[in-house]
Image: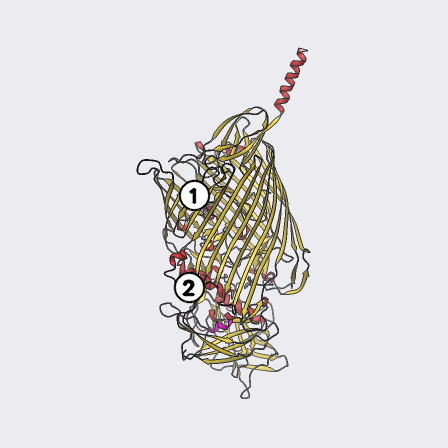
Amino acid sequence: MKIYSQILVALLIASVVFTSCEEVINPDLQEADAELVVEAWLNNKPEDQVINLMMTQPYFESTTPPGVSGAVVTVQDSEGEVMNFVEDVDQKGNYRWSPSIPGETFGIIGRGYALTVSYKGETFESVSYMGRVPVIDSISVIFEESSPFYPANSYSCEFWANDLPGSGDAYWIKTIKNDTLLNKPSEISLAFDAGFSQGGNFDGIAFLPPIRTSVNPFNEDADGNLVSPYLPADSIYVEIHSITYETFTYLNQVVVQTNRPGGFGELFSSPLSNVSTNIFNVNPKGSKVVGFFNVAAVSGLGKKVKEN
Amino acid sequence: MRLLTFLLCIASLTSQAQVKHTISGYVKDASNGEALIGATVFVKETGGGGVTNVYGFYSVTVPAATYTLEVSYVGYEKIVQQVSLEKDIRLDIELKQVAEQLEELIIIGEDENADKVQSIEMSTNKLSIATIRKIPAFLGEVDVVKSLQLLPGISTVGEGASGFNVRGGSVGQNLILLDEAPVYNSSHLLGFFSVFNPDAVKDTKLYKGAIPSRYGGRLSSLLDVRMKEGNIKKFEVNGGVGTIFSRLAIEGPIVKNKGSFIVAGRRSYIDVLARPFVPLLQEGGALNFYDLTMKANYNLNERNRVYLSGFFGRDNFLFDNNQGFSWGNKTATLRWNHIYSKRLFANVTGVYSSYDYQLQFGEDNINNFKWNSSISNYIFKPELSYFIDTNNELNFGGELISYSFEPANAVGTSNGDVVDASLARKYNRESSLYIGNSQKISSVIALEYGLRYSYFQYLGEGTTYTYNDTIPGVRKTPVSEKNYEKGETIASYGNWQPRFSLKVQVSEQSSLKTSYNRMVQYLHLISNTTASNPLDVWTPTSNNIKPELADQFTLGYFKNIGKDNQWEASMEGYLRYTDNQIDYIDGADILINKFLEGDLLSGKGRAYGLEFYLQRKTGRFTGWVSYTLGRTELQVEGINKGSWYPARYDQRHNFKLAGFYNINKRWSVSGDFIFTTGTPTTFPTSRYISQGILIPYNANDSRNNVRIPSYNRLDLSARLEGRTVKRNGKPRKNTDYWVFSLYNVYARKNPFSIYFTQLDKRYVNGDLLQSQAVQLSIIGSIVPSVSYNFKF
């Protein structure tokens, strides 16, 4: 919210007052050793669950991150059940768990999960748990002839769901528009209870308006003008993923570090710093590791946008 | 019998010669009655004298005799007066401004007698309003704070930064006073303009070190801005029309020669001008700032004078009637000067000051979000000056400040449900006592020494948290909380602050000065962005946050060169050690965070440097060159692996040049050039992808390991004085002048920051994420402007 409001304020200033300028540059960067990246984001959707192991790359190397082969990856839950992740033969670095019975899903709400990765004689561990998630009651489509944020005659969407009563739930809201996941850093939508932060005290009510309308992409056409987020015949599918408080903190840091609108927004932005990780080398003096482990329960709802 | 009478006469004559009397009074400007601050009253026969204080009052005590008094002030004609001192005399003097000449007399710095009289001051810079008006200004608008930035030891991190840095101190370590009232955010429009209206300002003085014991509360500097009292003799209107805003100031007598007032206002109108082009502004959006500076004063009688000053300023960025963002300061000061005796001058001040910002979103009452944050304080400050004799001036007094913080008053309404996310108010009290003496030991050595004691209390009602001990650099979580009743002392801190300065007059034209200061700061400006901005939060010392401390040493050599002291040169070194400096964990959450203290880290700082300054004071061509070589760094457990790292505002080389040239009676030109080393920043070394987002990563855990490119800029401006005679030959009553200026003449895109991000496009499955680095400049082109200024 704070970042959202800061960015909008900055955009307003920029549009009216001065033109700042930006230039893409190619500075020299210090070298550093590659580190292990463990990306373990599991959920209870009826599909295969994949954990990715990669190495970090030099910052300007925009190639596919090198996958890490030959590791042993397992997840054990608080009841003692062990789930094995087997490396794909054709895809280095992908470690897959497949349902053994049709319809089986990964994970049960309320259970804890421990991840163990063994690689080159070192062991890396992490713990998480699967939190609960509310159902999405509905999605509304709003047609506006004029609005301060969108161009004239826009269709925008809003989802309706209530945070579950009892403080401490955190969520990641993902939106899929026409089979494309809205995945830009500015589109990461997070909630703690129904609000933005732990100190907020927004428990048990409908998600706050900026969260409900976070399902709208800000797209620009070739001339740089904003276009309507949705058009008739578009389909929208909203998923709420439950995340732990640690994951919530991590994703907020990711937003701060990656959502750089540039221009006057930089006056309000934080300098570069590393995001956190919840994966640790059992030997504190051993190799470093980055990445994150989260087990999510997911609820989803879709809608087709109709002409007004 | 005759012998006895004779002896008695001799005896009485001799004893009379030992009796001392006092000459005291006010020094004022003859044209408008404004008290002159820092004017010199030089007693030729003793080689000493006094300097007027901030209210224009002086007091000189010498043995009974006849003296020649020389009263002088920069930019004014000197008055020489014979005084026969048989009893205490009240002598108020009015000085005439120097008539405009081609060869302008000193407009920058002190007059020649100042050094002889006292001038123990070091590490201070005084800029007259006349000089400030000549410096080429951004968008043609004269600015007090921007002009200070041309002096040695002062810098900023770039355009857009609200605030300035003094000798490697952070923006929140400057005490900014407007007629004794603290100003928490001295900028409009994100640092492009300051809140001080030049039409209402009489005097600005910046102390970079050697801060006298009567001041305290911030570590790095004191910017003391004094407002004009208002023309006590006749009505006067000053104003100007410029590209960004217009100003109008009206001043005049309330009762002629007894009381006067001044009201000065400014408003920007860029939103009015831009309205036809920007749809947002047509639907209730607004982008403006304005300020109103007012003062009234009244001489109750010869010994009593009362002043009432006020300031109100606001910046508004609104999307429509219900949504937007605004901030501003409000101050009100009531002062009473009382002359107890010729030697005892007292001033009692009462101040109310507040700073707040507000954000509001939501188009109706069912769905909205309102957030505001404020800091307000009440101050009571009695101060006394006792002019013991020409060699000693004793100052003592106290200060009582009561603070009330509202870190966040945040209410959100979602679908009709109202939720209050407000943080609790915090209450604090700061009490101080001080005593200080300026002493002239001989004609060669002068000392100023003093002691200040301050006591800070964190009061209930309130709730405090204690946090767990964890690896430094990781967010601390609260482990316990404790509630306190109203008025209970939760935490308290007392600090002694010795102050000391020494001047040795090495020769008639040169002197050596050294000083030591201990400063304490109880309020902390929390800002983890690249530059400070209006959303930064002031947070008080608490059970978790300790007071910031600083020890500063300075040593300098000052020399006047040439006949008539046409040149002034100085070289001053400084060293400041600071403790309990606040820094932030990576990913700190600063706003509306009840557990903010868990995201803060505490460490040490050190700043050191050498300032060189050369100024030509008289002649058709005047100006100065300043160069500062400095370093400021921090050491915090949990950042940069615990090693020293440069602060965000560390600029090794800081070079500035300012020049003023009078072409003829009507045209004058000025220019300035600035070069500073780029500020430090953190670059990544590596990248990885998490959930389809590119994450930049610094595998060495370093902070501020690189510098952005340097900042340099040239500005030029020309001033055309209006005609002094009308077409028919009669002299014009009114004066006016035009200013034409060019900011950033060679259109350099001075970098503000370099940020790393993935290329902004829609990535679908299988697409490779492209990394890029982008350099941002806030002003990237030449900015011309015109302004018209009038006075009648």
Q: Around disc 2, counting alpha carbons within 10 Å, would you say few (fewer than 14), some (14 to 19), or many (20 or more)? A: some
Q: Earlier in the sequence, mark 1 or mark 2?
A: 1
In the image, what residue occupies the spot 63% across and 79% down?
Answer: A78
The chain containing the residue under callout 2 comes to: B
| Res. B618 image quadrant | top left
The chain containing the residue under callout 1 comes to: B
Marks 1 and 2, how far apart at CA: 36 Å
Q: Position of residue B505 (x, y in %)?
A: 54, 33
Q: Is residue B241 above or below residue A74?
A: above
For residue B237, the mark is 1
The secondary structure type at the circle numbered 2 is loop
Q: Around disc 1, counting alpha carbons within 10 Å, would you say few (fewer than 14), some (14 to 19), or many (20 or more)? A: some
Q: Does the image show residue A119?
A: no
Q: Position of residue B789 (x, y in %)?
A: 39, 45
Q: Which residue was labeled with disc 2?
A: B283
Residue farthest along the front direction in this orientation: B255
Q: Is residue B445 magenta?
A: no
Left or right of B211: which side holds A66? left
Q: How is the image coloured?
A: secondary structure
Q: Amino acid at mark 1?
A: Val
* Whether marks 1 and 2 lie on the same chain: yes
Q: Is residue B428 above or below residue B212?
A: below
Q: Nearer the viewer, residue B664 or B239?
A: B239
Q: Nearer the viewer, residue A98 or B246?
A: B246
Q: Position of residue B196 (x, y in %)?
A: 48, 48
Q: Amino acid at mark 2?
A: Glu
Majority secondary structure in the magenta region: loop
Q: Does the image show residue B97?
A: yes
Are circles 1 and 2 on residues that touch, CB within 8 Å? no
The magenta span reads: A211-224
Q: Is residue B509 above or below residue A208?
A: above
